[in-house]
Every structure is written in C-alpha cells, then in structure tokens.
Amino acid sequence: MSTARLHGWLGRYGTCMAGIILFVFFALCAPNFLSVLNLSNIVKQISFMALLGLGFSMALLVSELDLSFANICSLCAVCVGWLVHTGHDPALAVFVGVLVGTGAGLLNGFLVTGLRIPSLIATLATASVANGLSFMVTDGVAFVGQWDSRFLWLGRGAVFGVPTLIIWLLAANLVAWFMLKQTRLGFRMLAVGEASEAARLAGVNVRTIKVIGLALSGLAAGIAAVLMTSSLASAAPNSAADLMLTAIAAVLLGMTMFEPGRANVPGTLVGAIIIGMLGNGLVLMGVEYYFQDILLGVIIVASVALSSSVLKKAAFSL
C-alpha cells in the first residue's frame, strides 16, 4: 500500500481502529467488561447521547450550531412527564414531546435565517429560554412516582430479547443515514453545508434547508427526551444537562472517521460508543471520575484539530 493510500485509510478508519484497541484493552483489564449485561448497559447508556449527537449533526451538516439541544431535551422531558403524571394518554405525551422539540428547532431556524442571528448566539438564547420554561413547568422539582406501563415500555421494554432503546437508536440512525445518502433533501443539506453559495446558485433554497437542519436537531432532542423519561421513569428540569458535552464530543469524534471533516451518521454513532465505552471501562477499573472530564476535554480538542474548522464556519455564517 502506498503512503498516500495508507494516509487516506488511516484518515477514514484510524479513530475506529483506536476504538477497537480501546475495547481490547478494557476487555483485558476491566473486570466484567465483556459481560453481556455490561455491554448491553453501555449501549443503553449511550442511546440518549447518540440521539442528541445525531440531531447536533443535522444542524452541523448545514453549517449551523445548535447549542440548545440539551435544554430543549430537558424541556421536552418535563412536558412529557407532566402529561403522563396528570393522567393523559401516553401517545399524546409522546406526540407533545416530539412536537415541542421540533417547534423549538423551527424557532432556532427562524432566528438564524429570518432574523439573521448567528446560530451560536441564537441557540444559546433558546437554551436559556428552554431552561427557564423547564423550571416553570416543574416548579424546580422532578416528576417521579408511578408511570403508565405502556409509556415505560418505550424505554425499558424489549423485542425478542433486544432492548427497545437499542432498537430506537438503530432505527433513528438508519433513517438519518438513508435521508442523507438517498434522498434529494439529504443531497441538498450536504450541498448547503459544503458550499452554501454554490448551492444557492444551483437553485437550492438555502434558508429553508438550514431551517430543516435545525428543526431535525430539535426533533432528535424530543425523541431523546421521550426515551429518557421512559427509561429513567423520571423527568427533571435539567435531565439532559450532562449530555451536552458528551453528545458534541461524539459528533466531533465521528468527524475524524468515515468522512473526515464532515459530521456523519455512522461516525457519530461510533463516536458515542467509544465515549460510552471509555467512561464505563474507567469506572470498572476504579479510575477517579474527574479523569473522565479531563479525557472528554482532550477528545474535543483533538477531534476539532483533526477534522476541520467547521465549527467556526457554522458559528458565524448564515
């Protein structure tokens, strides 16, 4: 293999290979890491992070930043929790949760394309509003107690022995991948992200595509909120607060593989698995919790350095 081909191969699959090496390391050094229960727990634990990362990827693909997705997810979660706890049909609660998330994403799209506010600033404002609304809905306390069993099945059930969380995660990734790679909308999103002016000259409505990208980020936050509330059987105004950095790190790590420099669906999923595996393995080995935060910061810096300047472009371009 020539040096150029080897360099290209490492650029596409180097991070994935590092993840495999990390897996082997923990399999040898971390107690019970290879148990079926532990491996299943890793996938279930990263489900919410991966879904939120998938939504962040949709915004990033159209050269926009959505820093509100975690707060939007928390807002959706408390809306779902309030509806279920007040005796409403779980189907209505799910619908409202997804609707609130999508609506918040559309609001972000309007602020960015209609009022021409940079997405970094617009989504930070939306995050603040969503956070305040979450505490207003709950009066600062979490919804806990008895939950409708039909609703709990969404996040705690299983189909032929496969946890529903894993099924929802794989389904969401397959739908997103198909949309981006096999539909006209996906082609237009990629075109806008690569060169918005060229896409505009080719007849693509750039503003509409950007709104769709941000709306999809909100949609993913709504879906993650429903599954998180169902799985944890609780809904707090800061339910998803801890997931923001890990979800962003998963996307950035994914940008170093498969399609280097571009957010991509399989990369985000693998990135989430690597981060989840890292945290789980360190805990099993008895490593202090604060090392995970240090490593997460290192992963974010290294991923941005290896991928591209896409975040700067997304933050301050329309």
Image: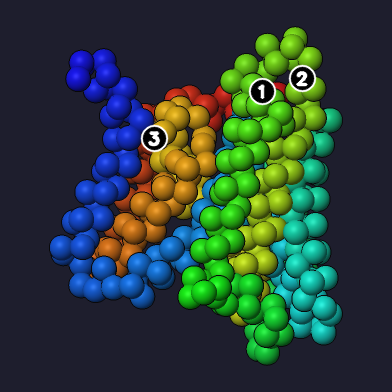
Q: Earlier in the sequence, mark 3 or mark 1?
A: 1
Query: What's the amino acid at mark 2?
Result: Val
Looking at the image, which residue is at 67% across and 85% down? 149
The residue tagged 1 is 192
The residue tagged 2 is 204
Query: What's the amino acid at mark 1?
Result: Val
Q: Is 190 drawn above or below residue 222 in the view shown? A: above
SS at circle 3 = loop
Query: What's the amino acid at mark 3?
Result: Met
Instruction: State how many labels appear.
Output: 3
The residue tagged 3 is 257
SS at circle 1 = helix
Residue 202: mark: none
Quadrant containing the N terminus is top left
Task: Decide if residue 52 is in sight here.
Answer: no
Is 311 placed left or right of 216 in the picture? left
Q: Colour scheme in the image?
A: rainbow
